[in-house]
Image (cartoon, rainbow, N blue to C red):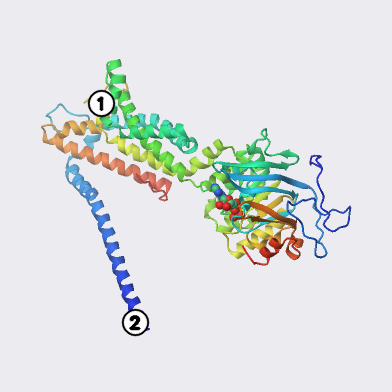
Amino acid sequence: MTSIVEASDMRRRRRHFIDRTMTGVMVGAAVVGVIPLVLILFYLLKEGIPGLSLSLFTEDPNRPGLPGGGVRNSIVGSAIMVTVATLIGVPIAVGCGIFLSEFGQNRLGTVLRFLVDVLAGIPSITIGLFIYGLMVVTRGEFTGFAGGLALSILFLPIVARITEEMMLLVPRSLREASLALGAPSWMTTLRVVVPTALPGIATGVMLALSRIAGEAAPLLFTALGNQFFSTDLFHAMDALPLRIFVYAVGPYDYWHDQAWAMSLILVTFILVVSLIVRAVIGTRVTVRS
Amino acid sequence: MVLDSEPRTAVDVTGETGTQSFQFQPQNALKAPAGPEVREEPGDVALRAEHVHAYYGQKLAVGDVSMEIYARKITALIGPSGCGKSTYIRCFNRMHEFTPHARVEGHIYLEGTDIYDPNVDATRVRQRIGMVFQKPNPFPTMSIEQNVAAGLRFTNIRNRSEIRDRVETALKQAALWDEVKGDLKKPGIALSGGQQQRLCIARAIAVEPEVVLMDEPCSALDPIATLKIEDLMYGLAERFTIVIVTHNLQQAARVSDWTGFMLAGEDGVGRLVEYRPTQDMFTNPREDRTEAYITGRFG
Ligand SMILES: Nc1ncnc2c1ncn2[C@@H]1O[C@H](COP(=O)(O)OP(=O)(O)O)[C@@H](O)[C@H]1O
Ligand SMILES: [Mg+2]
């Protein structure tokens, strides 16, 4: 009797030891994973806050070398091009994702899925070059629209695949419930599956939006950048990442400060967008990215 | 009668000619009746299955089942798990064919029309033959009211006051109205499991189908929620024809008028062994296998 008790006691201790060790390892890994994010945010705040000012949002760049001025043109340009990309990208990408999940269990679906994955893997600078050849060379002008289009190509595969995954996560039982009520399958898709997947799809759109908002490469040969304020989609347009690039490698200290401040603005924008989405749709959906 | 004119063999179960108690010819040999029979008037036929075979790919899951489902009666399908009850009941509203590679052979007549006729629109069939599933599955994005109205919206009923009336009627028939009338705008998934299942029943009957199929509707519920559903089924049977799959023999005995016993053979093919008025079935099973099952000797 006693020996059995001792053995089980020892085993229990052993189990507790393993349990605690493994928990410790997991917590450690999580902490290590979060460290870069914390460091980036910390550094960004430290370097970015000195450059922040109201004039950054209300004024356009001064003549190079003359301290002061702002980046209103870049903020507005980014907003316009990201909006264009979203307007073009959402219908195509969501439609594509819905197609893949609902009608994509065949050869056509497999091919399309493969193409979408290839598209996701194409370097963003290549996409910029492609649009350059397609629109800029032929029309002889760098345009904000070309920039928005390049961003939309970046946006497309991300949202298409997230949409597909979110649609596939909708339990089969809900589709069956709808079909059993006599709803045709297209109606089941539109009225039951898409609404159920919508929070996930919206989160995917936001994810893609924050991804493209920070991209400089696709805009280099499409929107080009513009030190003057412009809302004309058919002329060169500025964007925050482009201006960050120019200022960060430029010779003036106030440019460096403004570059940090712009980075802080971008990251804050992304954080705020994510938080708003979370607040609106609730916190039940978690996106694997 | 809505039936077609094809002659059928009437089985005279009592030996008294001319007073056939039900018109069903099981494929297997019948044992001689062992006692006085309980008379159950079959009445009108709501659904008539003829030689239904259900396949998953090459695998035959349900083999050659023929039976008549009587209108405004509760018909229970019992049998050990895996014997094909779910597969079979899903043939009645053409849900079986949604499983990839699944198909059905045979005929099921609804008012004289074969629902497996190539010209028949499966969505129409499902509007007339509703279904309640094993796990409650209210639409998570919809309120209680929207859930019940879902089928109406799908079938293009737009009139608001009509929808409101039918939602109320359906919720009352599903014995849920008193519990939810104050918060029809609340999400359907906020309800308890038993309430969710009654919500699904309300959703199924709101479109006023002729038949309601229920596949183990209580197996995910506690005994009290189960009793509530059994209670409301009697009321439903005044208006609807009900087919219920259950693995709970007491439930079949309590609620049903007719009981079909299914069993998978050595070959893994589920067949209908016996189909009779419930009371006969439970007091006086004709087949040894039925008796073995209902006395708990296997399954
Ligand atoms: N989706 C499926 N694919 C292949 N075989 C299936 C599928 N669903 C059920 N089956 C098989 O069909 C038989 C009957 O299953 P089912 O109708 O679920 O039985 P029951 O509802 O009586 O428990 C079982 O042998 C089961 O393994
Ligand atoms: Mg089953």
Q: Quadrant of residue B123?
A: top right
Q: Amino acid at mark 1?
A: Phe
Residue B9 x %, y %:
81, 48
Please name the residue shown 27% across and 21% down the image.
A142
Q: Report the disc number at residue B52.
A: none
- Between circles 2 and 1, the one closer to the viewer is 2
Residue A125 x %, y %:
25, 29
Which chain letter matches label 1?
A: A
- Label 2 vs 1, first from the N-terminus: 2
> How dense is the environment of label 1, judged by Cα within 10 Å: few (below 14), some, or many (20 and up)?
some
Q: Amino acid at mark 2?
A: Ser
> How dense is the environment of label 2, judged by Cα within 10 Å: few (below 14), some, or many (20 and up)?
few
Foreground: B206 or B256?
Answer: B256
Q: Quadrant of residue A146?
A: top left
Q: Report the disc number at residue A3.
A: 2
In this rendering, would A210 be left or right of B115?
Answer: left
Q: Residue furthest front?
A: B266
Which residue is identified by label 1?
A229
